[in-house]
Image: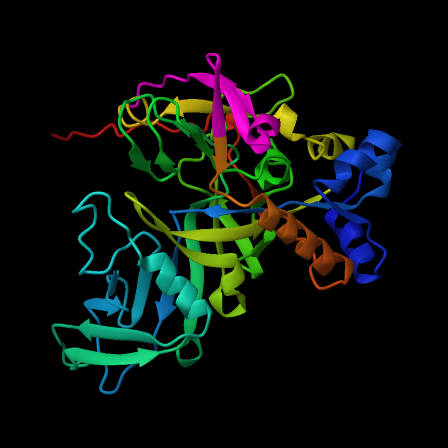
Amino acid sequence: MKKTIEEINRKIKKGKAVVCTAEEIIEIARTKGVRRAAQTVDVVTTGTFGPMCSSGAFVNLGHLKPKMKIAKAWFNEVEVFCGIAAVDAYIGAAQLPEHDSGNTPYPGTFTYGGGHVIEDLVAGKKIRFRASAYGTHEYPRIQANGSFTINDINDAFLFNPRNCYQNYNVAINTSKEKIYTYLGILKPEFGNANYCSAGQLSPLLNDPDYRTIGVGTRIFLGGGIGYVVRQGTQHDPAVKRTKKNIPIAGAGTLAVTGDLKQMKPDWLRGTSIIGYGASLTVGIGIPIPIFDEDILRATCVRDQDIVAPVVDYSYDYPNMTGKVIAHIDYRALKSGTIRIKGRSIPAFPMSSYTKARDIACILKQWIVQGQFLLSQPAQALPTREAGAVVRPFRGRYT
């Protein structure tokens, strides 16, 4: 049994496509069997919603009068990168306002940053800006102060270099002091365990070998439509896998883009992480076309089948020792309590499984209603067979 994107899209256009979420397919396959489920189901939808620091947005303000070749600029006092062209800028989700003292005193609260600017922009709020330039003959203006909303500017699009990790660490703290990390506050001496993944709903865990997700795949992004543009930075498909072909560490990542003017603040949220910095919580949903039984079988992955590495963030993570204390499955993590070395440890998510489910359901509705067609990837993502690996920095430094 083989299906194609074209065949599935024809069924979507006719309103005859059978679509279910990555939660629903587990029960469907259990009752009908994999073969029959693969024949019946056309698309499985996935979702994830969590902090994704490697995110940001390109903005084109439109030309000022007289024209200005902006060298430096700030949006709501958050500096943006202007080394592109006259009125283009890139705002990173983790960038802080100039007045923010960072982690002095420690821990910093990071109440506002680039991710919050992006959320405010999408929400239609007024963004204050100031800009400076050195001036040229054709771009004579050297100073500008003003404000704009997303409707006042030419272009604004999300471009995130690394989102949607296939799997991720569970963070614990073995030291005697409380520590502050991008996975939240970690209490001393195994006081808690924090994780960040949608588990069985997570997109790349439902397509472990990247057979359907590739360059050009159309996705749900921030409440609008976006696309995968390449593998994300630190894409590492060569990590060890279980007998069921599930990565036991971070593995694959995606670089994604989409029009901010289509997006909604419900699915792009500026995020403050105490003692670490600012970020952006991003909602992503990806459809998995069911071409054959193998793809269907992969979408039946369950939380109890997925294990994540437990890593000490007080010493092993910052010092890159590579040590893993244990591997814990997501059913245990989502229960709220895990056991490590005889200890019972509370587990807390940094991501929202409820919002991930909502995303998968919204994407399902879009497809059923014929509002969202699938796209054929223009290029596959690098796989372990292709020799794709991630290495630490190999240059010189002191």
x%, y% of residue 304? 64, 25
Q: How is the image coloured?
A: rainbow
Which segment is the magenta one?
320-346
**Which image quarter holds the N terminus?**
top right
x%, y% of residue 391? 34, 27
The answer to which of 250 and 277 lies nearer the viewer is 277
Question: Above or below — where is 238 with respect to 299?
Answer: above
Residue sitting at x 31%, y 46%: 274
Question: Above or below — where is 10 with respect to 211?
Answer: below
Residue sitting at x 29%, y 33%: 179
The answer to which of 377 and 62 lies nearer the viewer is 62
Residue 281 in the figure: left or right of residue 307: left
Residue sitting at x 37%, y 57%: 115
The quadrant holding residue 74 is: bottom left
x%, y% of residue 222? 53, 58
Q: Is residue 292 magenta?
A: no
Q: Is residue 337 magenta?
A: yes
The quadrant holding residue 71 is: bottom left
Residue sitting at x 86%, y 42%: 40
Is residue 385 visible in the rendered image? The answer is no
x%, y% of residue 322? 36, 19
How many numbered discs sit on the rendered protein? 0
The quadrant holding residue 66 is: bottom left
Residue 157 in the figure: left or right of residue 146: right
**Which image quarter holds the C terminus?**
top left
Is residue 353 visible in the rendered image? The answer is yes
